[in-house]
């Protein structure tokens, strides 16, 4: 595991299980919500799936299973790839309470076993802020491409690069030049929910934020055919972009 991944792993295994219970409810409570309205729990991402039943989905940096479990309820075969054992514990407990199967691989995304999972998935899906955890976006996109079957689809939703120059999503992270290639240490997005004495002790993550052109060109250069690029308003201010979604195919 590369050095910055080790740093990120420490951050994502610090009181994280307790955070999800506090933020999202007990696994049983979360499972109940997922079962009641799995499409609703997928939120805006549901429109990017052509179908669910029987498809193989790689949920990249799938965190606590907040999207993986609803996908499994809808009939998908879901494998979560994530760096945190705490995320795995919560996700599998939710899946068990919902009575669905969920595969969860704790690993560095750049070290996914491509002998096992290469050309395996119909859909590679990620959301909620993923790309900034990887210092070399081209390496990341090449892994995404390798996981997909021919004619498979990548759904990549992330924080809009506009957030490099404005803390529009209120994550309380530093802002910088839009064109900065700086690698910096910063708090996890949910650090702001902790009491100050705990927040001060939390390990930092190592980040690299990208421009729109860096992201799109990496998708294209890794072999994908770009099909769609949507921008979504920030939840704090609908007049400015807060997120985006890319849909790309492996031909």
Image (cartoon, rainbow, N blue to C red):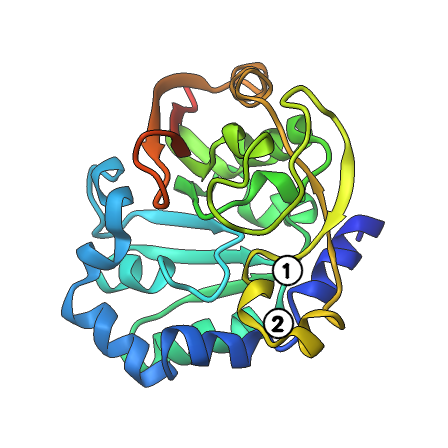
Q: Can residue 244 be seen in this view?
A: no
Q: Residue at image x 70%, y 43%?
A: 207
How far from the left and from the top, in percent, is residue 59?
Answer: 45, 51
Q: Mark 2 points at which residue?
A: 85
Label 1 SS: loop
Q: Residue at image x 22%, y 73%?
A: 33
Q: In the figure, 114 relative to 40: above or below?
A: above
Q: Which of 196 and 37 is in front in this view?
A: 196
Q: Is residue 86 visible?
A: yes
Label 2 SS: helix
How far from the left and from the top, in percent, is residue 93?
Answer: 42, 80
The local crowd at label 2, few if under 14, some if 14 to 19, many if 20 or more residues have their Cα within 10 Å, is: many
In this rendering, would 208 be left or right of 96?
A: right
In this rendering, would 171 be left or right of 198?
A: left
What's the CA distance linking mark 2 and mark 1? Answer: 7 Å
Q: Mark 1 points at which residue?
A: 83
Q: Nearer the viewer, residue 201 or 213?
A: 201
Q: In the figure, 131 relative to 36: above or below?
A: above
How far from the left and from the top, in percent, is residue 18?
Answer: 53, 81
Q: Residue at image x 44%, y 80%?
A: 22
How far from the left and from the top, in percent, is residue 215?
Answer: 55, 23
Q: Which of 117 and 33 is in front in this view?
A: 33
Check residue 12 in the rendering and tell me which mark sits there, or answer none. none
Q: In the figure, 11 relative to 28: above or below?
A: above
When asked about the image quadrant of residue 143, the answer is top right
Q: Residue at image x 61%, y 29%?
A: 142
The local crowd at label 1, few if under 14, some if 14 to 19, many if 20 or more residues have their Cα within 10 Å, is: many
In this rendering, would 133 be left or right of 73?
A: right
């Amino acid at each position: 595991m590369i050095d910055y991944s080790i740093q990120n792993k420490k951050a994502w295994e610090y009181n994280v299980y307790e955070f999800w219970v506090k933020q999202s409810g007990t696994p049983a409570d979360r499972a109940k919500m997922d079962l009641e309205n799995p499409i609703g729990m997928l939120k805006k991402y549901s429109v990017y799936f052509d179908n669910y039943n029987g498809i193989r989905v790689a949920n990249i940096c799938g965190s606590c299973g907040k999207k993986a479990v609803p996908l499994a309820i809808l009939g998908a075969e879901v494998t979560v790839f994530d760096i945190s054992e705490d995320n795995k514990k919560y996700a599998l407990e939710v899946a068990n309470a919902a009575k669905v199967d969920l595969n969860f691989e704790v690993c560095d995304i750049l070290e996914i076993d491509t002998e096992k999972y290469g050309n395996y998935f119909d859909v590679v899906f990620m959301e909620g802020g993923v790309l900034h955890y990887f210092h070399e976006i081209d390496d990341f996109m090449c892994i995404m491409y390798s996981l997909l079957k021919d004619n498979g689809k990548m759904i990549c939703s992330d924080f809009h690069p506009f957030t490099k120059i404005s803390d529009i999503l209120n994550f309380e992270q530093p802002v910088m030049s839009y064109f900065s290639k700086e690698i910096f240490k910063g708090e996890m997005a949910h650090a702001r929910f902790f009491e100050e004495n705990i927040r001060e002790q939390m390990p930092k993550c190592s980040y690299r934020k990208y421009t729109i052109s860096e992201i799109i060109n990496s998708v294209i250069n890794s072999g994908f055919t770009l099909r769609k690029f949507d921008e979504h308003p920030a939840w704090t201010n609908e007049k400015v972009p807060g997120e985006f979604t890319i849909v790309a195919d492996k031909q």
